[in-house]
Amino acid sequence: MMKTRVGYGPQQAARSRRHRHPLDPEGELLEELRKTMERMRALEKLKPGIDRVARSRRTPNIDETGPKRPPRRAPRARPFPGRKATALVVVTLFVATAVALVLYNSPTETPIQVNPPRWKDETATHFTFAAAGDFGGPESVDSIALMQRARTAGMSFVLALGDLGYTTDEAGWCHQLRRYVPELVIIAGNHDDGEGDGGNLSHYIANCPYPWSSGPVAGNGTPGYGYEYYFDYPAAKPLARFIMLAAGLEGAINYNYGEDSPHTEWFEGAVQDARQHGIPWVIVGAHRQCVTVGKKDRCSMGQTIFDEIVEAKVDLVLTGHDHVYERSNLLARSARCRSVNTTDNVDLSCVVGNGRHGRYPAGNGTVVVVQGVGGNEIDNVTIDGSDPEIGYIAEAMGGNANTRSGAPGFGSVFYTVDARSIRAVTNFCPPGEVGADGQCTVNPTTVFSDQFSIANSTNPPAPTDLSSSAMPEFGGAFVAPHMTEAAMLVVAVEIPVLLLSWLGARGSRGSRPR
């Protein structure tokens, strides 16, 4: 513990602390406990002096040469009523609270609870979610940080758009990510079919189960969740229908999304049903993309199903597969645009709205977001005009270039959905540039960012930067979103020590003679 010198005030101490090397969580805990013990020892040293002062006040000055008087009994100190019992209860409560918080925020070997207390940005009129694909493995600091930032921003759930962990440790992957946002909703990617270097989808489903009691609606002849399904959110009065497809997968999970196939007809029926029930928004999620200026094959989702999606005027399509970020212009089919062609010449008649301004009118077409930078790697993009598909793309970020200034990064896209609009903002950090709380350790303004909105108004509200959202009060108590385990323990130790010192001082004062 640093001793305070004359002229060495709080500002100088703060500057000194900023120049120290940051400690790891274990070192921070030991340092704080050491400081606490020193404070306790300092309080203990003060006790003899306090006792001497108290005795001198209670003992009168008696003249030994004069007539002796019977000694006056000093009044007995009356301790604070119930002092020991009160202190014991308070100490127990603080320690129990700290231990519970530490256990909740620390990894364990047992499966986590899927509904721990957590603030979510969700009301009867709006909700939020995050989406990303192509994650890193269980130990990926960037994938874990992605989930930490989603939690801090209060996301209601996270959509994992396939290629979940490139790992056979499916349980470890689910455990690590669901520690922060238990509502993790998955769809299969080409590395999740149990073949090659990825995991097995059935194992992912067992460890990342569907998080809500109102189950999803399974696709035609499929197992449902993780394969092909849809769900409405919120369940009571839905604002959006999420239709999750396994389009374009070719391994053990291989569905036919050709024209008039059972899977394509199921998709069309799901969209029509949502419209008939007055659900404001239809969102499609899949792993493989179609339009892209990344390095993956063109329209690996399949041209037929993508054209069906655009013809149905699905509001938003979320995909991964290409390890880049891309946002399309507004796309729609018409008498002139028979197909959003990606295999031959690009048909710019399919572009019905410029997305560079970031504002799209609802109901006029489809917006596509490729979000494949969930923590695995960042691929390059071709935005110099040599790839004709750039005509479909409004914004793009790759490892080599992007359409805006800023460094490339891993992360997710945060969405806010209400009956009037869908608003989105990216939340990226450069690889490895994250702290223990998941936040960027570099200036966020130096990182690529994008935002957009789809709204049924010509002047929709601007997207909100959800990455800086504060955690609100929760049942009358505030819990800091980045509170470390060491800080929790220090709070549990420091407050009881101060309380006991105060109670001890009350007990040592005694009572005045009557």
Image: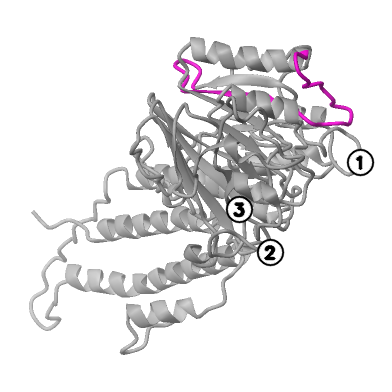
Judging by the rendered image, the residue that carries numbered circle 1 is: 196
Residue 249 visible in this rendered orientation of the protein: yes
Q: Is residue 96 above or below residue 203?
A: below
Asked if disc 3 and disc 2 are in contact, CB closer than 8 Å, the reply is no
Give the mark nearest the N terminus, 2 or 1: 1
Residue position for label 2? 400
**Residue 225, located in which quarter of the rendered image?**
top right
Q: Of the numbered discs in the image, which one, if any, rests on residue 115?
A: none
Are there few (<14), some (14-19), or many (20+) residues within 10 Å of tag 3?
many
Residue 61: say if magenta. no
- Tell me the SS state at disc 1: loop
Which residue is identified by label 3? Answer: 396
Query: Bounds of the magenta span?
Result: 234-261
Q: Residue at x 56, y 72 (%)?
A: 22
Tell which of 205 and 97 is nearer to you. 205
Asked whether the viewer can see residue 122, the reply is: no
Q: Which x, y percent locates residue 327?
A: 58, 45
- Give percent across and percent down for residue 442: 53, 67
In this rendered view, identify the residue nearer to me: 511 or 198. Answer: 198
Q: Nearer the viewer, mark 2 or mark 1?
A: 2
Q: Nearer the viewer, residue 223 or 175?
A: 223
Relative image position of residue 499 (x, y in whole percent): 35, 55
- Structural crowding at the residue carrying mark 2, measured as other residues with C-alpha within 10 Å and reported as few (<14), some (14–19) or many (≥20): few
Vertical placement of 478 versus 247: above or below? below
